[in-house]
């Protein structure tokens, strides 16, 4: 079995947002860091970067934040944005404040607009991010849409044909799967991530989306017990299920 990567304690905690290297050194000297039941006194000590570190290390009596690579699953609520640069409350404000100082930083895997709720992945793992959003991997995303008016019945064939052109674009959409749930409700599964794609697809067939919720990415479904605004760390099995 290969040995886990190691990092200096002060660098690790600074990268996790616990403060500057000087502040972390003061925390260590005060006896605030415990690993495997032993109080660490040397900020330069090497510690393992392993997934179970929060079960082994405490900071001021609380489990240490998970080290990189870290992936979260969030139930994005309505009214929040996915970008650091957009005005309004962001998804990052739903996370611990010190996480905004983590290095590497956290990013959402794709975005949900302010008026769309549901499953959102947030990660500092660049490889995972690109695998999910890359068109080469064809990772499906399913959206539940509520519509302004009843569907005509032709939408499924139009979306599945792979010939639909959105206004302002020069290439047709990849085939998408429509499941009619009621005259004004549908589940739409797409493998692309174009700007406001689901809303624009229904607009292209003469309808208007009044509510939109994403409940699945690949083989990963939004947990029924994850309330809007809540999040949890995604384990390795969860990450694998995205591509399963």
Image (cartoon, rainbow, N blue to C red):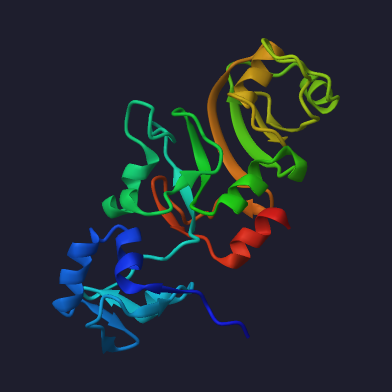
Determine which quarter of the picture holds residue 173: top right
In-front residue for pair 192/12: 12
Q: Is residue 214 visible in this depiction of the protein? A: yes
Q: Position of residue 36 (x, y in %)?
A: 35, 87
Q: Quadrant of the N terminus?
A: bottom right
Q: Position of residue 226 (x, y in %)?
A: 46, 54
The image shows a total of numbered marks equal to 0
In-front residue for pair 78/1: 1
Q: Is residue 16 visible in this depiction of the protein? A: no
Q: Is residue 174 above or below residue 158?
A: below
Q: Quadrant of the C terminus?
A: bottom right
Q: Is residue 164 above or below residue 59?
A: above
Q: Is residue 189 left or right of residue 17?
A: right
Q: Position of residue 52 (x, y in %)?
A: 46, 76
Q: Is residue 78 above or below residue 238?
A: above
In-front residue for pair 178/219: 219
Q: Is residue 227 left or right of residue 166?
A: left
Instruction: Work out which residue is located at the far front of the displayed protein and give it.
Output: 44
Q: Residue at x 59, y 66 (%)?
A: 236
Determine which quarter of the picture holds residue 8: bottom left
Q: Position of residue 100 (x, y in %)?
A: 33, 48
Q: Residue at x 69, y 41 (%)?
A: 134
């Amino acid at each position: 079995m290969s040995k886990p990567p190691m990092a200096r304690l002060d660098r690790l905690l600074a990268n996790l947002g616990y403060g500057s290297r000087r502040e972390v050194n003061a925390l260590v000297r005060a006896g605030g860091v415990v690993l495997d039941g032993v109080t660490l006194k040397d900020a330069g000590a090497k510690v393992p970067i392993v997934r179970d570190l929060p079960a082994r290390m405490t900071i001021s009596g609380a489990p240490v934040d998970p080290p990189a690579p870290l992936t979260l699953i969030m139930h994005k609520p309505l009214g929040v944005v996915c970008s650091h640069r957009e005005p309004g409350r962001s998804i990052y404000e739903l996370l611990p404040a010190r996480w905004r100082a983590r290095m590497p930083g956290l990013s959402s895997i794709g975005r949900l607009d302010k008026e769309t709720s549901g499953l959102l992945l947030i990660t500092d793992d660049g490889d995972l991010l690109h695998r999910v959003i890359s068109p080469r991997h064809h990772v499906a995303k399913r959206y539940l849409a509520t519509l302004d008016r009843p569907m005509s019945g032709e939408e499924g064939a139009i979306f599945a044909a792979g010939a639909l052109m959105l206004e302002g674009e020069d290439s047709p959409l990849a085939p998408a799967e429509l499941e009619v749930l009621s005259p004004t409700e549908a589940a739409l599964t797409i493998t692309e991530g174009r700007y406001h794609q689901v809303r624009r697809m229904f607009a292209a067939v003469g309808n208007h989306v009044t509510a939109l919720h994403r409940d699945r990415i690949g083989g990963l479904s939004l947990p029924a017990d994850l309330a809007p605004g809540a999040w949890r760390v995604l384990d390795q099995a969860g990450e694998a299920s995205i591509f399963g």
